[in-house]
């Protein structure tokens, strides 16, 4: 059973016939408190499922961990069957490692991060830019990889198929094979889940790792930032890019594509990677 799907009775209104009651499938949205060694770091509104990947991907994006080697045990807090079980997760450091939760700004720690959250709670945009070292030139990728990534992501969205109410993020290698694909009510959470999967598979920055991140929502500043931290040189979005996302992509060496469709796309930054 998909933990990200539930049902509610709704009134179906159609101008051609009388109203009727039906059972409709909805995307589940619940809070997840992310802790590090018992200390609360953030609460995010997310789709249940892949919580371990979400927590690890979030901590990586925030700079609290540098690789999966920093992580020891990751587990849901409490006892199965009790109220609220599954909505708090704790990440313990690996033996000999320490995790500095102060890297998350004081204004963000312990506060609610909504499923639509961008750079909320940040003291300064420069705090994000400081984490993004410039990516080297290359690799060149065919335009077909960009256009095909959206279809490849869509084929891995079972929750969206049932509910129409979640975002997705998918990471692809140079051959167009999907290395990770995740869904969530929050587009930022979906990216953290996908990056978390890459971390567990030790594919972040590795040969044969991800060269393209496809996202179902708009390309915002934080989406580009998460790609830069994960060393993914190309971001493809089905929607528009924000001005700050374009500026960051240009600064850190990321090829940013928007409005990606089967017959074309817009290139906002570093078009030299894309060949026809």
Image (cartoon, rainbow, N blue to C red):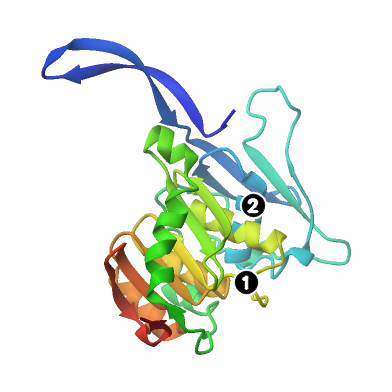
Q: CA distance from mark 2 to mark 1?
A: 17 Å
Q: Quadrant of residue 26?
A: top left
Q: How many neighbours does mark 2 have within 10 angstroms: few (below 14), some (14-19), or many (20 or more)? A: many
User: Residue 253 at what x, y percent from top left?
Assistant: 45, 84
Give the labeled residue for mark 1.
209
Can you give x and y, in whole percent of width and height, for residue 138 in the image? 50, 86
Using residue 275 as the reference point, say whether residue 134 is left or right of it.
right
Q: Nearer the viewer, residue 226 or 164?
A: 164
Asked if residue 14 is positioned above or below residue 29 in the image, the reply reads above
Mark 1 Cα shell of 10 Å, populated few (<14), some (14-19), many (≥20):
some
* Secondary structure of residue under mark 2: helix
Residue 240 sits in which quadrant? bottom left
The disc, 2 or 1, on the residue closer to the chain's N-terminal end is: 2
Q: Is residue 200 left or right of residue 111?
A: right
Helix, strand or loop under label 1: loop
User: Marks 1 and 2: in contact by CB < 8 Å?
Assistant: no
| Figure check: 148 above or below 254 | above
Give the label, 2 or 1, closer to the camera: 1
Q: Which residue is mark 2?
A: 53
Give coordinates of residue 260: x percent, y percent: 32, 64
The quarter in which the C terminus is drawn is: bottom left
Could you tell me if residue 126 is visible in this image? yes
In this view, 142 is above or below 20: below
Q: Residue at x 30, y 60 (%)?
A: 239
Q: Is residue 263 left or right of residue 43?
A: left
Point out residue 100 in the picture as x, y percentages from the top left corner: 70, 65
**Residue in view at x 60 percent, y 43 percent:** 33
Q: Residue at x 56, y 63 (%)?
A: 177
């Amino acid at each position: 059973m998909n933990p990200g799907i539930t049902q509610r009775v709704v009134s179906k209104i159609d101008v051609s016939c009388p109203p009727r009651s039906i059972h409709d499938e909805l995307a589940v949205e619940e809070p997840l408190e992310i802790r590090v060694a018992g200390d609360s770091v953030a609460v995010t509104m997310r789709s249940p499922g892949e919580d371990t990947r979400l927590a690890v991907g979030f901590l990586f994006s925030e700079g609290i961990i540098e690789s999966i080697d920093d992580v020891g045990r990751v587990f849901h807090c409490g006892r199965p069957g009790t109220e609220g079980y599954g909505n708090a997760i704790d990440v313990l450091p690996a033996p000999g490692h320490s995790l500095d939760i102060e890297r998350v700004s004081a204004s963000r720690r312990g506060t609610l991060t909504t499923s639509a959250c961008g750079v909320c709670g940040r003291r300064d945009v420069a705090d994000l830019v400081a984490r993004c070292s410039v990516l080297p030139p290359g690799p060149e990728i065919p335009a077909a990889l960009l256009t095909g990534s959206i279809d490849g992501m869509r084929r891995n969205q079972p929750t969206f198929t049932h509910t129409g109410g979640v975002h997705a993020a998918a990471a692809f290698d140079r051959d167009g094979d999907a290395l990770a694909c995740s869904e969530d009510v929050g587009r930022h959470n979906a990216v953290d889940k996908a990056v978390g999967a890459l971390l567990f598979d030790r594919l972040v920055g590795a040969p044969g790792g991800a060269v393209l991140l496809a996202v179902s929502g708009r390309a915002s500043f934080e989406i580009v930032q998460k790609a830069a931290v994960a060393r993914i040189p190309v971001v493809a979005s089905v929607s528009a890019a924000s001005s700050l996302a374009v500026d960051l992509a240009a600064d850190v060496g990321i090829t940013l594509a928007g409005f990606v469709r089967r017959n074309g796309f817009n290139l906002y930054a570093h078009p030299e990677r894309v060949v026809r």
